[in-house]
């Protein structure tokens, strides 16, 4: 019995070792392509979701977001709050942002964009806007009459929302901020492009500039963004709440707004596309293995004629199919991580919300590798079982 | 009480081909004694191979009974018939029927691996290959052997589990005269020295001299 159990492995090994090499490698290649197809689509969607999430965190909300309590316009005592927050373990930085109550005018174009007053040093620790300057430079704390604007406000050729922009404002140009009862001219110090349309529709001035114009805003903020290490979990919200800051704490997911729905939609599409991908892979693998086994119909007949039990023959082809699957997954993984992922890291998909690269989670990888394995095993089992059910002479004589 | 190692009782077989019924065997009854060297002869389409398939339990008759060692075989399921083929019968096909991915010795040892350890199977296979004259070709693949050598491998494979009966379906049909003679001499030696019963289909008149008895078929009937 022990010998009989070894026989399927022995047969499968000899098929691989001495079978037609081009058939083996072609099958392997097809399996790896089927696997890459499965993980590519999934990792593309995961990459878009991941890229979008990073954009939200890095340009807009930070990991946690503090807003005024219900019925209040501001988070009070912002300087103390920022100090408390930055003293927490795992907090990289905290930036208090105050909505500037002004309209912006450039030449004869006037509009109401979001203008935020920030401490530039704090903002640098929380958002990546300072790293995304495409012209000029980021703010300094003492910049009292300078402003930086997003690419969507500056406008120009190729800008997504050019129709609603300054249509080509440049560094050094003047813009006027009109407040309730007075106005102030600012010089464009820099233009930033985060590649996230919503973030690029904002402008920043220094908190000192706003305080000079409206002293009442000296120690208040409309939001405080908190940036943490990647390691913190959602319980961190309780730690922030325990600081008794005058505001409500949200995770970035809760503050993501429209992008949260977009990410959810991508997840649904990803699930749907993955199911279709698995079906296509299943059919492809089934055809490949079915053709391979049907071509060995005579051989299966001979084995039965000389007394080799059907279960041994079936099991040998199941093992063969499993080997194809494992080798296909390994080859596919190698191609994916050695060639495809680096290529898309160098040439990401450019989207209006982010530059998406391929991101594959362990769970997605394992699930898809498992799917390939099961599909292959079933694809080996069914045709082998059917062939061993045909009459021996029909199998041998090809009737 | 019959001494027959194989006995058939009015076996009939009809094939359906192209909408027509072909009666390959019609009420064939025969008995083969242990140690006989039987040659089944007849024209093409006379039912020789069909009869051999029934005797070797590769196919079932539509009616009638095949008995081996007085045991009815037509009631056995495929698994039990397979056990029977494995342990008691050897079969040699006209087209050698070797597994292309296995070497000569691996082809021979395969049926023995169903019944015992592979080391022992290998030892027995090597010995049998030496007996049929393939001392230096144990590790050749079928594609590296001539037709005669492949048929010798098939003979060695049929002998691996020490069968009582060997069935051979035109084993020399694809061989040249010298190779054919070698194969027939091996059969003769196995029959005379080992006492193995041999049932062989042929339509070569010069081979009939090797047989201890001839069975002639014509249109599915014994004549």
Image: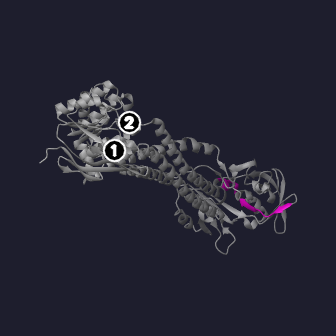
Query: Residue A288: percent from the left, percent from the top?
Result: 48, 46
Colour basis: one colour
Q: Secondary structure at mark 2?
A: loop
Residue drawn at point x = 82 percent, y = 50 percent = A172
Toward the right, the furthest residue is A108
Give the number of marks: 2
Image side of residue A303 versus residue A287, left or right? left
Q: Is residue A32 visible?
A: yes
State yes or no: residue A119 in magenta: yes
Q: Give the residue number, with chain letter if any, for mark 2.
A: B101
Q: Is residue A41 above or below residue B166?
A: below
Q: Is residue B163 visible?
A: no
Q: Which of the two residues, B57 or A352, is positioned nearer the viewer here?
A: B57
Near mark 2 (Cα within 10 A), the count class, few <14, some 14-19 or many ≥20, is many
Q: Secondary structure at mark 1?
A: helix
Query: Residue A114: percent from the left, percent from the top?
Result: 74, 62
Toward the bottom, the furthest residue is A71
Q: Which mark is residue A8?
A: 1
Image quarter of residue B94: top left
Image quarter of residue B93: top left
Q: Are marks 1 and 2 on the same chain?
A: no
Residue drawn at point x = 61 percent, y = 45 percent = A345
Q: Which of the two residues, B96 or B177, is positioned nearer the viewer here?
A: B177
């Amino acid at each position: 019995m022990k010998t009989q159990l070894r026989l399927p492995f022995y047969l499968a090994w000899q098929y691989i070792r001495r079978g037609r090499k081009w058939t083996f490698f072609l099958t392997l290649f097809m399996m790896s392509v089927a696997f890459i197809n499965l993980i590519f689509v999934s990792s593309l969607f995961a990459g878009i979701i991941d890229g979008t999430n990073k954009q939200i965190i890095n340009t807009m909300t930070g990991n946690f977001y503090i807003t005024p309590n219900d019925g209040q316009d501001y988070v009070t005592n912002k300087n103390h709050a920022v100090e408390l927050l930055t003293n927490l373990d795992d907090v990289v930085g905290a930036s208090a942002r105050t909505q500037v109550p002004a309209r912006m005018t450039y030449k004869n174009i006037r509009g109401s964009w979001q203008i935020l007053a920030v401490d530039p040093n704090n903002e640098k620790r929380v958002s990546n806007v300072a790293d995304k300057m495409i012209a000029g430079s980021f703010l300094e704390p003492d910049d009292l009459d300078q402003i930086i604007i997003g690419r969507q406000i500056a406008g120009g050729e190729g800008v997504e929302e050019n129709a609603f922009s300054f249509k080509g404002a440049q560094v050094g140009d003047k813009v006027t901020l009109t407040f309730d009862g007075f106005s102030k001219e600012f010089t464009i110090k820099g233009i930033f492009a985060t590649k996230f349309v919503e973030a690029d529709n904002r402008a920043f001035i220094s908190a000192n500039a706003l305080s000079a114009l409206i002293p009442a805003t000296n120690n208040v903020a409309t939001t405080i963004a908190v940036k943490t290490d990647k390691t913190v979990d959602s319980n961190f919200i309780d730690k922030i709440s325990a600081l008794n800051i005058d505001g409500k704490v949200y995770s970035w997911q809760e503050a993501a707004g429209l992008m949260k729905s977009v990410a959810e939609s991508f997840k649904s599409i990803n699930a749907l596309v993955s199911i279709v991908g698995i079906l296509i892979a299943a059919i492809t693998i089934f055809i490949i293995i079915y053709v391979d086994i049907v071509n060995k119909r005579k051989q299966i007949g001979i084995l039965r004629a000389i007394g080799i039990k059907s279960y041994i023959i079936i099991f040998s082809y199941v093992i063969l199919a499993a080997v194809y699957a494992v080798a296909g997954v390994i080859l596919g993984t190698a191609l994916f991580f050695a060639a495809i992922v680096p290529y898309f890291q160098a040439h990401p998909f450019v989207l209006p919300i982010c530059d998406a690269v391929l991101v594959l989670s362990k769970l997605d990888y394992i699930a898809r590798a498992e799917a390939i394995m099961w599909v292959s095993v079933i694809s080996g089992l069914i045709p082998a079982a059917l062939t061993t059910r045909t009459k021996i002479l029909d199998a041998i004589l090809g009737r | 009480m019959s001494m027959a190692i194989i006995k058939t009782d009015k076996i009939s077989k009809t094939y359906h081909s192209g909408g027509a019924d072909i009666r390959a065997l019609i009420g064939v009854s025969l008995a083969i004694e242990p140690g006989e060297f039987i040659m089944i002869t007849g024209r093409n389409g006379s039912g020789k191979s069909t009869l051999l398939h029934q005797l070797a339990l590769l196919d079932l008759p539509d009616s009638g009974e095949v008995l081996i060692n007085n045991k009815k075989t037509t009631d056995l399921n495929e698994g039990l018939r397979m056990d029977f083929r494995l342990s008691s019968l050897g079969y040699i096909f006209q087209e050698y029927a070797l597994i292309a991915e296995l070497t000569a010795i691996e082809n021979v040892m395969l049926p023995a691996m169903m019944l015992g350890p592979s080391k022992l199977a290998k030892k027995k296979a090597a010995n049998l290959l030496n007996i049929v004259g393939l001392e230096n070709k144990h590790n050749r693949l079928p594609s590296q052997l001539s037709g005669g050598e492949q048929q010798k491998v098939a003979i060695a494979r049929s002998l691996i589990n020490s069968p009582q009966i060997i069935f051979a379906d035109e084993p020399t049909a694809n061989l040249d005269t010298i190779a054919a003679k070698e194969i027939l001499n091996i059969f003769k030696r196995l029959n005379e020295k080992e006492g193995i019963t041999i049932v062989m289909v042929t339509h070569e008149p010069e081979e009939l001299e090797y047989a201890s008895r001839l069975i002639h078929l014509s249109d599915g009937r014994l004549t």
